[in-house]
């Protein structure tokens, strides 16, 4: 290694230390990577389950509070929110909302949808959860293994 590179690394470390930045333990870094991958898989799994439950969701859910929750989490845009509010029939509004969510690029769209349904429609959330028990147990196991680092990284919304 060159002397200039060594000096650069030492100065970089000193600046990080002075800003109270601490290196992240390797196991915690990998925990975050696994968590991100699990969240992406969870979102896709919930999306597929919602497609299977599409008719039930459309006919059972009054979408106004769900739309408010998703808007507050920046899952749906202001334009989409306003367009959806102008759909006069609740079933049509719910159908349009789901259609927009299916094409959304947000990485946690359906995780947030599940959370939005939790308070008012727990039986739909139970149906979603019944269809993905292995994923839930993996996420719970991930929470247990990472909590040993002193960080509680993932809370299952139940």
Image (tube, grey):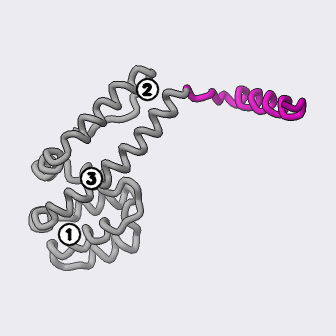
Ranked by sequence position, the earlier of labels 1 and 2 is: 1
Which quadrant of the structure image shows residue 60? bottom left
Q: Quadrant of the C terminus?
A: top left
Foreground residue among 150 and 8 = 8
Identify the residue position indicated by label 1 in the image. Answer: 94
Quick one: label 2 or label 3, which is nearer the N terminus? 3
- Viewer-proximal residue among 4 and 112: 4
Q: Residue at image x 84%, y 30%?
A: 1
Q: Which residue is mark 2?
A: 151
User: What element does badge 3 sit on?
Assistant: helix
Q: Real-space Cα distance between discs 1 and 3?
A: 20 Å
Mark 2 or 3, closer to the camera: 3
Separation of disc 1 and disc 2 at Cα?
38 Å
Whether 23 is among the magenta residues is: yes
Crowding at mark 3 (Cα within 10 Å: few <14, some 14-19, many 20+) = some
Quadrant of residue 106 in the image? bottom left
Residue beneath label 3, please?
45
The residue stretch that appears in magenta = 1-25
Q: Position of residue 2 (x, y in %)?
A: 88, 32
Q: Is the residue marked by circle 1 packed among few (<14), some (14-19), or many (20+) residues within 10 Å?
A: many
Q: Is residue 47 above or below residue 31?
A: below
């Amino acid at each position: 290694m060159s002397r200039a590179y060594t000096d650069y690394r030492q100065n970089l470390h000193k600046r990080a230390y002075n800003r109270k930045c601490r290196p992240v333990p390797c196991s915690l870094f990998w925990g975050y990577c696994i968590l991100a991958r699990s969240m992406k898989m969870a979102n896709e799994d919930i999306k597929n389950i919602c497609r299977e439950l599409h008719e039930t969701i459309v006919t059972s859910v009054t979408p106004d509070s769900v739309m408010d929750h998703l808007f507050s989490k920046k899952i749906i845009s202001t334009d989409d929110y306003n367009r959806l509010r102008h759909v006069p029939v609740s079933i049509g509004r719910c159908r349009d909302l789901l259609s927009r969510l299916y094409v959304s690029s947000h990485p946690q769209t359906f995780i947030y949808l599940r959370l939005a349904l939790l308070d008012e429609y727990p039986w739909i959330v139970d149906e979603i959860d019944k269809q993905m028990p292995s994923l839930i147990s993996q996420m719970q196991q991930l929470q247990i293994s990472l909590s040993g680092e002193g960080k509680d990284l993932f809370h299952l919304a139940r």
